[in-house]
Image (cartoon, rainbow, N blue to C red):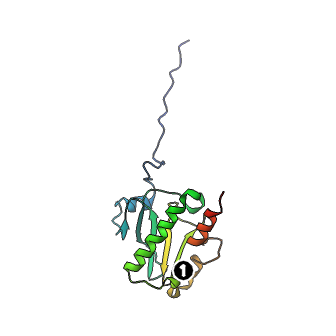
Amino acid sequence: MAATPTAEVEIDKTDQTVDGYDKKCIFCKIVNGEMGTELLHNDEDVSCFRDIHPGAPHHYLVVPTKHVGNCKSLGKEHIPLVEKLVETAKEILQKHNVTDLSDVRFGFHWPPFCSVTHLHLHVLAPTSLMGFLSRVVYRLNSYWFVTADQLLQRLNSMS
């Protein structure tokens, strides 16, 4: 009896993140300059661009330049990254003449309430001018939205 040839199966790696880039992720494409989106900030760690559905007059998304999963997947080692996202957000607001940080919201949608799995900090200002729907979508103390401070507290409490 002749041996049956074994077929080598080629594994499709298109879904994998390679060198911090996930080719199926819209935010990776934006950061990589593939979408024609204006980048307000871009360095090796963090990038920023405007939200396509603004919930406030100033609505920016600050993202890690390399693909990082949603906020639920973060560990204590991500604290410096989250702090850098917030720091960059404040710099972007200052460049756009937003100086009253008491009327600003920095936060993340908590899974499964996020439409893009690439970690992204929503920066909304002034919150006093947010419409009804935006006040619901970016609501403080809700099941679906956590502030940057709440996320940092959660990460700091991890053992």
Residue 96 higher or lower than 37, as above or below: below
Residue 95 quadrant? bottom left
Q: Is residue 147 visible?
A: no
Tell me: residue 22, above or below residue 116: above
Give the tally of numbered discs.
Answer: 1
Residue 63 locus on image (x, y percent):
46, 64
Task: Check the picture and name the quadrant holding the C terminus.
Answer: bottom right
Q: Amino acid at mark 1?
A: Ser
As rendered, which of 23 and 71 lies closer to the eye? 71
Q: Say which of 85 and 6 sits in front.
A: 85
Residue 89: give x, y in percent of width and height: 45, 73
- The x, y position of residue 133, in whole percent, is 56, 81
Residue visible at 46% across and 71% down in the picture: 87
* Relative side of 95 to 8, left or right: left
Question: Which residue is denoted by mark 1 in the rendering?
Answer: 134
The residue lying toward the viewer, choosing from 139 and 23, is 139
> Looking at the image, which residue sits at the far bottom?
128
- The residue lying toward the viewer, choosing from 104 and 35, is 104
Disc 1, SS: helix
Vertical placement of residue 14 versus 84, above or below: above
Q: Position of residue 56 (x, y in %)?
A: 47, 82
Q: Residue at x 34, y 61 (%)?
A: 33
Q: Residue at x 47, y 41 (%)?
A: 12
Q: Is residue 105 visible?
A: yes
For this orientation, the residue located farthest to the top is 1
How packed is label 1: few (under 14 Cα within 10 Å), some, or many (20 or more)? some
The N terminus appears in which quarter of the rendering?
Answer: top right
